[in-house]
Image (tube, grey):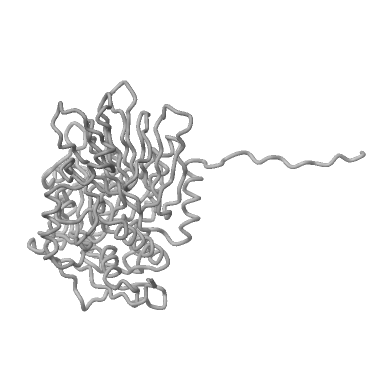
Amino acid sequence: MDLALHQLDFTTLEKMQSNETHETHDDVVFNAEILHRRKSSMNSIDGARLLQQRAISRQNTACFVHQLLEKQRKERRGVALNHINEDNQVQDKQDDPIKLTADDHDSTTHSRLLTKKQLSEMAWGVRELSKRLGSIRLKLKVKTVFLLTKAHDETLIGYTREVAEWLLSTDRQVRYTVYAIATLSKTGRWLTVSSYVEKTLENNHKFDAKGLVSQDPSREGRLKYWTDELCAKRPHTFDFVVTLGGDGTVLYASWLFQRVVPPVLSFALGSLGFLTKFDYDGFQDTLTTSFRDGITVSLRLRFEGTVMRTQWREGEKGHDLVEELIGEESDDDRTHAPDGSYEILNDIVVDRGPNPTMSAIELFGDDEHFTTVQADGICVATPTGSTAYNLAAGGSLCHPENPVILVTAICAHTLSFRPIILPDTIVLRVGVPYDARTSSWASFDGRERVELHPGDYVTISASRYPFANVMPKGRRSEDWVNSISRTLQWNSRQRQKSFHEWTEK
């Protein structure tokens, strides 16, 4: 199959400003007519949704990355970038505006429900597109900018205001709309809000929202405030994301955009800098160059994690998790039901939580039972997350372009369990056996702590929604090696002295 990118038509990413057009968002949807599925990861509700999807045509997406993936899927024999100019840049096709159509968050077929072939094709398409995007520059029409600032750091409010003021200035050729949140309560603690925070920012003397807008009448209505709900339900509202902080701020951006992720450009204002590739001191030049000349994007693999709850009543005995997932009972689609899905960029960790004893964890891959892990927990990491908890638990460092899943035990009670690396086409299931002494706890990128009772498990598979990370010019492999050398002092050692031959004198 030749997937050379040479015939792809780009559509504009210009967003309609009316509220009606922001009511929905789009994503990549695969064919729901699946003959073979992992039934133990489904229930009857999933089947009904799949039947409903058969009557719905595939839709375009508001994000250029997922638009390329959808185009790639449709043209099976190959897609391409035919709007590349002499400078190896890609420009939006301005005469073909994108259409925003309805898309229910719950109606999408999750990657855990795809067949082995479909999952392989999806993962391969993301990898191929990532390679192509790494060698070109995408020139986008950016009109709406999303600002995300590091939490618990009051000093960054001034930086947020500085970037917002620069974007709102009349010196810019484009009248950008800026969404920002940098709120502090009177006690000095950061607020977690579920509604617009305009009044809070308006009373913050450092951000001085009123003064920022009053400097120029053209700024009226262009400074807005985002919420978690807006990011989750209408990600197409934003054309570009700018983060001010460290790697944790970038992870939070990934968490906010659980599905389609706009391109994310990160300024290093935190402790580490694996994902923050740009210095804040030159933010004006960086943003000007990105908007004018285009950007280079690296697609980071994300995982889709789904919590599956056992449907057996408490007190019932004689059940076996292994039999339910891969044994004779695996055809029964009523054993488990989904209870929430999450897109993660770093890792999914299942551990003992507050329990004083170690966890008993069953590990499955596709339709095979791998092993029973007795440890404090298990960490399933993306290549991006290899430098996080995975590294602390003794796992291997992994280049972010590797299409793999890293599995590392946390303080395993055995000398023979070694970290393993699996292909990203496998669907992992990490569960708590029915006869376990205690429950376990799952966390997704360090958030959304969920208790797993005996019989519950988590499915982990490659996500159809990669994380679009804006990269500086240069070789990406060299940038990654430099980052681990700079932040982790990788293989830092005083050089061994050479021999000096004795002389007769």
How many discs mark residues in the rendered view? 0
Q: Is residue 172 above or below residue 81?
A: above
Q: Farthest residue toward the right?
A: 504
Determine which quarter of the picture holds residue 109.
bottom left
Residue drawn 40% across and 44% down?
Answer: 406
Q: Position of residue 371 (x, y in %)?
A: 38, 37
Q: Is residue 7 above or below residue 412?
A: below
Is 471 on the left-hand or right-hand side of 488? left
Q: Farthest residue toward the left?
A: 20
Determine which quarter of the picture holds residue 102.
bottom left
Q: Is residue 421 visible?
A: yes
Residue drawn 19% across and 62% down?
Answer: 33
198 or 140, nearer to the observer: 140
Q: Position of residue 367 (x, y in %)?
A: 32, 47
Determine which quarter of the picture holds residue 186.
top left
Q: Farthest residue toward the top?
A: 356
Q: Is residue 250 visible?
A: no
Q: Position of residue 175 (x, y in %)?
A: 21, 65
115 or 375, nearer to the observer: 115
Quadrant holding the N terminus = bottom left
Q: Position of residue 187 (x, y in %)?
A: 18, 31
Quadrant holding the C terminus = top right
Q: Is residue 407 above or below residue 95?
A: above
